[in-house]
Image (tube, helix red, strand yellow):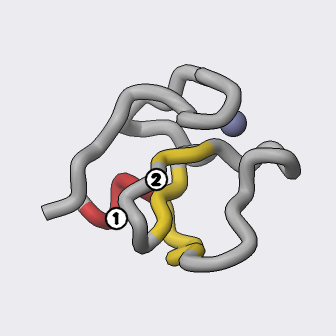
Amino acid sequence: MLELRPSCEHCDKLLPPNSSEARICSYECTFCLHASCLPSIGFIGKSRSILN
Ligand SMILES: [Zn+2]
């Protein structure tokens, strides 16, 4: 089961469970949709809420 974190690991932007900006990659990294936060690989591209 993926560990859900409450904020972006890159910029510490708060990502509440219902946030449409929350994303998670295949390495269980939680991040927002800011350009500098998006990982180049392993991007699932689905809202975190879908994974719940
Ligand atoms: Zn971020």
Residue 16 percent coordinates (x, y): 43, 28
Residue 10 percent coordinates (x, y): 65, 35
How many numbered dots are placed on residues in this image?
A: 2
Q: Is residue 8 above or below residue 44?
A: above
Amino acid type at image mark 2:
Cys
Would you say the beta carbon of the disc 1 residue lies within 8 angstroms of ligand 1?
Answer: no
Q: Is residue 5 above or below residue 45?
A: above
Cα gap from disc 2 to disc 1, whole angstroms? 15 Å
Judged left or right of residue 28, residue 22 is right
Residue 18 percent coordinates (x, y): 41, 38
Q: Quadrant of residue 38?
A: bottom right
Q: Which residue is mark 2?
A: 29
Q: Quadrant of residue 4?
A: top left
Residue 41 percent coordinates (x, y): 65, 78
Pick out the residue farthest to the left.
1
Q: Which circle's residue, 2 or 1, is located before the other in the chain?
A: 2
Judged left or right of residue 35, residue 1 is left
Judged left or right of residue 34, residue 43 is left
Q: Which mark is residue 50?
A: 1
Residue in view at x 54 percent, y 21 percent:
14
Q: Are marks 2 and 1 in contact (CB under 8 Å)?
A: no
Q: For mark 1, give the secondary structure.
A: helix
How crowded pointer 2 is (Cα within 10 Å; few <14, some 14-19, many 20+) is rated as: some
Q: Quadrant of the N terminus?
A: bottom left
Residue in view at x 86 percent, y 51 percent:
35
Amino acid type at image mark 1:
Ile
Q: Nearer the viewer, residue 30 or 33?
A: 30
Q: For mark 2, give the secondary structure.
A: loop
